[in-house]
Structure formats: C-alpha cells, structure tokens
Image: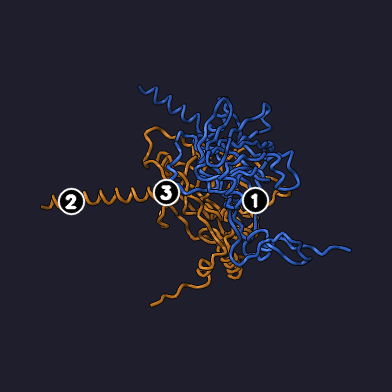
Chain colours: A orange, B blue
Amino acid sequence: MIYQVLRRTIRTAGVVACAVAVSVGALSAQGRGGRAGAPAAPVDPKDFSGYWELPPDGHDGRNIPTAALAATVTKQKLAAVAAHDAKGYRWCYNLGVPNLMLLTRPLDIRISAGFMVVIPEYSAAQNRWIYLNRDKHIPSDEYEAGVNGDSIGHWEDSTLVVETTMFHPENGILGIPGGGFRTPESKLVERFRLLNNGQVLQVLSTWTDPKVFRAPHTYELRYTRLPRGYEPRPNAVCDPYNDERAQLFAAPSKSTP
Amino acid sequence: MRYPSVLAAVVIAGIGVTGDHTRAQQSNLPDIEGTWVRLDTVGAGSFGAVNTLTGNAVLTPEAAAAAAAGRQGGGGLRPGLVADDNKPHAAGEPYVVTDGSCTLPGGLEPNSSAFHIVQSKDEVLIVRENPGLHRTIYMDGRTHPDLSRWRPTVVGHSIGRYENGTFVIDTVGLTPGGVPGGGRRTAETQLTERYTLSADGKRLTMTYTWNDPKIYQKPHSYQIVAERQPAASWPFEDWCDSGDPTQRTSVIPPTQLP
C-alpha cells in the first residue's frame, strides 16, 4: 500500500514537473537552454566565456563582510551617499562597478585576447570592458571618468587579476557592498578564477581607499555557469517615469482591508 | 590511452582564452574584433538623405499601402509629454526631442557612435557604444527558435557563420517597424548580413539584405562601411540623468543676437 502511494506520488510529481516544464517552455524561447551539469571534457581554466548568474537566494554565492571604515567617514557623509544612491535607484541611474556585478539577472561574459566584456540583462546598466591588451591605465587627463572606471587585467596562472580605478565622482550608484562608497581615488582589485571544473566563477573583490576604508575591504562573489545554449531574455527595464514604481520609493504601501 | 587525454587537455588549454580571438587570426577567419565607426560618405545633412546610401525599397502594394498609412511601428512619447510639432519655437520655449528616459532600445545597424565587435568561440557580440540592447550572434550551430514562442526584440535572433572569409549573419524575430530606405519589417522578415574585411583590415563593408515576400517585391539591399579604430581605443560612457527635468526638454532655442 505504501509502495503504491509512493509510486502514485512519484508519478504525479513527474506529470506536474513535465507540465511545468512545458508551460515554461511555451512562454518564451528566450531563456531556453540545454541541461545543466559539469561537462565530461576538461575545462580550459581561463575560458570565462559564458553566461553567469549569482544564486537566486541572496544568502548564497555572496560572502560580504562589513567594511571597516576610516575614522574620517562621518555619519553625515554616509547619509549623503545614501541619499545620492536612493535618488539613483529611483531615477534608474545606470549601474556600473561594483553594483553591476551584483545583479541577479545573468551576466554575459566574453573573453578574448584583447579584452573581457561583461554585459548585463538590464537596461539601466553600462556594459563593462576589461582591457587585457594594455598594462597601464589610460592617462587621467585623457580619460573621461565613468561608472565603470578603467579596468585592466593580467593573468597570474589561471587567475585573471583586474585593477579598476578612475571612477566618476557622482554618476551611478556609489555604495560598495559591505559598506563604504567609491570615490575617484578608489582602487578595486578583482581576482577572477574558475572553480568546480569551470561551473563556478569566483570573484574576490578588494577595495582600497584610505579616505574611505581603514583596511582593504574584501568580499567574494560566486557565479554559477548557465547551461550551454542559454539565450538571454530581453533586458529587464527600469522605467523612471512609471508612477506606480515611483510610489515604491516614496513610502511603504499601506495594507488595505 | 593516457596520451590522447593529455593531448586533448593541452589542445583545449591552447585554444582557450588567449585563444578565441587569436584562433580567428590564425585560422584565416576574418579578424573583425575591435572598435569600428560608421563611415558614411554620402547622405550627410539630414537623416532622410541617408536614403542616398540605402536606396529605396521596392515594396509590395500591400506593404506600400501600410507604410503610407503610417503603420510603421515605433514608439511614441509618454503620456503627458508634448512632442515637437515641427513648428518654429520662440527663444526660451523648450520643446521635447526625447522623452527623458536614459535608456535606448539599441538596434541592428550601427548609429553614429562607435560600435565594438567581440569575436568569441560561441558568440560574436556587436555592442553599440551607448546603452541599449546589444546584438548576440550565436556561432555554435544552433537554429532559430520557433517564432511562435519568441518575443520580438529590436535585435531579433541571430545566428552566424564564416563563409570564405566573410562573416554571415542571419536574423529573424525583429520587432515590427521601419527599415532604412523606406523598407519595413516584421518578426518573420529575414535579414542577411555579410561582413567583409578589406585587404588591409581597416574597412568593414556590411551588406544588409532584407527578404520578405509579403513586404518586398525584390530583396532590399544596401551597404554600410565602417572604419577600424586604433587598437588602444576605449568606449565612452553615455551618461544622462533621468531625474534631471531638462532631460525632457532637451532643446531650448537660444535668444538670437541682434
């Protein structure tokens, strides 16, 4: 009897799973992809090209300790940065480093001899370019600072070490995960490497800026590789003129009976 | 039996990273990676004059009637905004040429900004300098999706291949709308692009051919030429602030001097 119930349960679950799979597939071809799982063939440890996604559970794939801020960082300064960023989220400021790297939609990362590009599935984010074809930053008097800064990378064994600096003082979201904020003088060093036979991309980010941090601030992100054959969905849209969305930033909704 | 495995690992390591682009150079595939700027030598002066470059599409009577009726798709201003009425505006009287949003839709053909091509193993990316949906051209042999399950986008669904040194892209699944030279398109319309590199690698000739028997009496074809930028070039960030009210009144005629 127990066996029959168990078998019926499994059969029902299988039918439900198939129905869900079919209905999801029928919705849209975007987002389609093959089966996940570690490939049988050995993986090139430097081949980061693919679609990468942070785990949907915000507690997974992210190890972000609280930053030790410099004594010169006042409550007033933190409040000013928070107000700036609140306005930025309200008005869909284009994201760049570092918040671009924390999006929960997949990132399309492509790497070639000359550069690595990080492309989000989000309308309010800038594409990020990391240059592997030069070992010096663009001279500051030639560079127009932006939300992503200027990123150059080099290989240390199978780890891609990326150094980024020359951020825009105001554009974009300034807050840094774990606390603190970026300034034009901030320097970010990221160490990208593959784990789990190429199925996980680990990125260790370390910020230094004596005006902001008492000690270098390091956090870790781990992205999961999406199945080969994945196709991006249309960009998620941030609409600054959507009145109902704007209400979210005004005050918490009141429950109505 | 161990040697083939070791050899495979060495080969895989060799063609990886450094590899995708280098391999293109070594295997006589066209090396189109880099930064490019559209180089129009005709049509300057107005957007309409660009038709000098693209020619005029020969539409079917049905498509011509639809075009004449102004059903070419496209967006519109948000409620509450007043569009430019093409009349002269007094000094200091602001009028709208954008709706203030800082996001751009992206598109197929390059615009006046630079565009960047990334040539990787499974995909070729074509990325405009300003924000907006980039183009992904799948190179792994996949086919187009069933269009009944596809939500059309401004860049559609593209698959690519190399043919005798030419990069060939096939695209369907586009949002309905206009095409340069008076053409039109729907999700079923097929676009074939052929990218050919000049012998010195500095010019990229992109030939666009639109096919759709419901719209065109004959394939609608035109070329755009782009010029390669120096290897050390980098993209500019296009920044605007949607929270700035002047974004929505982006033209304010100045007071004329006597």
Give residue B46's position: percent from left, percent from top: 73, 48
Amino acid type at image mark 1? Glu
The kind of secondary structure element at disc 3 is loop
Q: Can residue A21 be seen in this view?
A: yes
The kind of secondary structure element at disc 1 is loop
Mark closer to the chain start, 3 or 2: 2
Q: Nearer the viewer, residue A230 or B52?
A: B52
Amino acid type at image mark 3? Ser
Identify residue for label 1.
B237
Residue B17 lies, with reference to residue A62, above or below; the image says above
Q: Quadrant of residue A213?
A: bottom right
Amino acid type at image mark 2? Arg
Q: Which of B68 and B100 is in front in this view?
A: B68
Task: Using the image, tell me which numbered label, if any, was put on residue A28.
Answer: 3
Image-based side of A208 in relation to B139, left or right: right
Q: The N terminus of chain B appears in which quarter of the rendering?
A: top left
Identify the subunit bearing mark 3. A
Give how far apart the Cα atoms at labels 1 and 3 are.
32 Å
Report the residue at 39% width, 26% height from top: B5
Give residue A180's position: percent from left, percent from top: 56, 61
Identify the subunit bearing mark 1. B
Give how far apart the Cα atoms at labels 1 and 2 are.
58 Å
Q: How crowded is mark 2: few (under 14 residues within 10 Å), some or many (20 or more)?
A: few
Give residue B182's position: percent from left, percent from top: 63, 44
Residue B1 lies, with reference to residue B129, above or below; the image says above
Identify residue for label 2.
A8
